[in-house]
Amino acid sequence: MIAEEAVARGHRPVLAGRDSGRLRVLAERLGLPWAAGGVDEIASFLGEARLVLLTAGPFGATAPAVLRACLEAGVHYLDIANDIRVAAATLAADTAARRRGITVLPAVGFGTVASDGLARYVADQVPGARRLDLAVLLGTDGSSAGARASTMQALAGGGWVRRGGRLVRQRLGAGSRRQDTPIGELTLAPVPTGDLVVTGRTTGIPDITVTFPVPMSPLGARLAMPAVPLVARVAGALSQRPTTSDSAAPVHSHIWAQATADDGRSAHAWVRTGEGYAYTARSAVLAVEAALGSEPLGATTVARAFGSELSFAAGGELLATA
């Protein structure tokens, strides 16, 4: 989908991947050059490339090698990982990226462009905000094996929140609550996503919690979710095949953000996007264009570098603000 979006917007990227058979079919259908090999061979793929967009997970295994190759070659680096450790390591490369005169942007897919863009939107309305709450209701037409593996890796690490500007471990399920949403009342549970790192850098807000819906009561979440890391470690080694949805109904995603200051000032908003993978295709290509069209930025975030506008341009529609 990302390759198709890039071609539709007039680009001719070189496609690189591990499966030569599938890669050839895609490249020939789109009329694009391609190169097949393992992630440890990425340096040999770069050639005269100006930028690499990493879309192949699990990102804990692929991102370090690709980022290192880009830094060594002086090539801009972007990825679509929504992973705490990957985002932290990517943003930690700021000094090296500035020294090499390149831009490094983590998490340029739905997570975190849609959520971080909305976070900046509400944070800009509350100068000095100390707390930010995010709720992500992701809707997709199926799931890829790489995406599921990345999710399992994140959950296997347990729960995290941001407190006082630092990542703090929290028991999974703690802090679960009921909340009205555009699709009904749901139980939302804190989850460990790259937003905790990315939105911390974008907004500077010290206390951040990210929640996802779970199919149980808050009490059920508090009791059952502590077992998720063990389940995730087992499940991560299982399902390797992509899944698709049989539903013909339109799929939407929703995100809520609320910024709150110590004196009670606050602002919140809901945004609706389309299907999550389609949003990622648009946001990733828009981020590529923005990176290529700007001066080198070092390691930063999409919303910090380009404001909330890119997140809305990728397909976000504000539903309600206050």
Image (cartoon, rainbow, N blue to C red):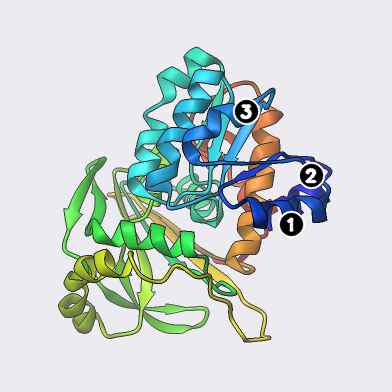
Q: Quadrant of the N terminus?
A: bottom right
> If you read the primary sequence from the N terminus, does the residue marked by circle 3 or circle 1 appear first?
1
Looking at this view, name the residue that lies furthest to the top. Answer: 99
Residue drawn where x is 17% and y is 58% of the image? 170
Relative image position of residue 194 (x, y in whole percent)? 39, 50
Q: As rendered, which of 244 and 212 lies closer to the eye?
A: 244
Relative image position of residue 120 (x, y in whole percent)? 49, 47
Residue drawn where x is 25% and y is 64% of the image? 233
Q: Which residue is mark 1?
A: 25
Q: Residues within 10 Å of mark 3 (few under 14, many from 20)?
A: some
How far apart marks 3 and 1 lie (CA) works out to: 21 Å
Q: Which mark is residue 32?
A: 2
Asked if residue 9 can be seen in this view, the reply is yes
Three-letter code, disc 2: Leu
Q: Which residue is mark 3?
A: 46
Question: Tag 1's secondary structure?
Answer: helix
Question: Tag 2's secondary structure?
Answer: loop
> If you read the primary sequence from the N terminus, does the residue marked by circle 2 or circle 3 appear first?
2
Three-letter code, disc 3: Leu
How far apart marks 1 and 2 lie (CA) works out to: 10 Å
Three-letter code, disc 1: Val
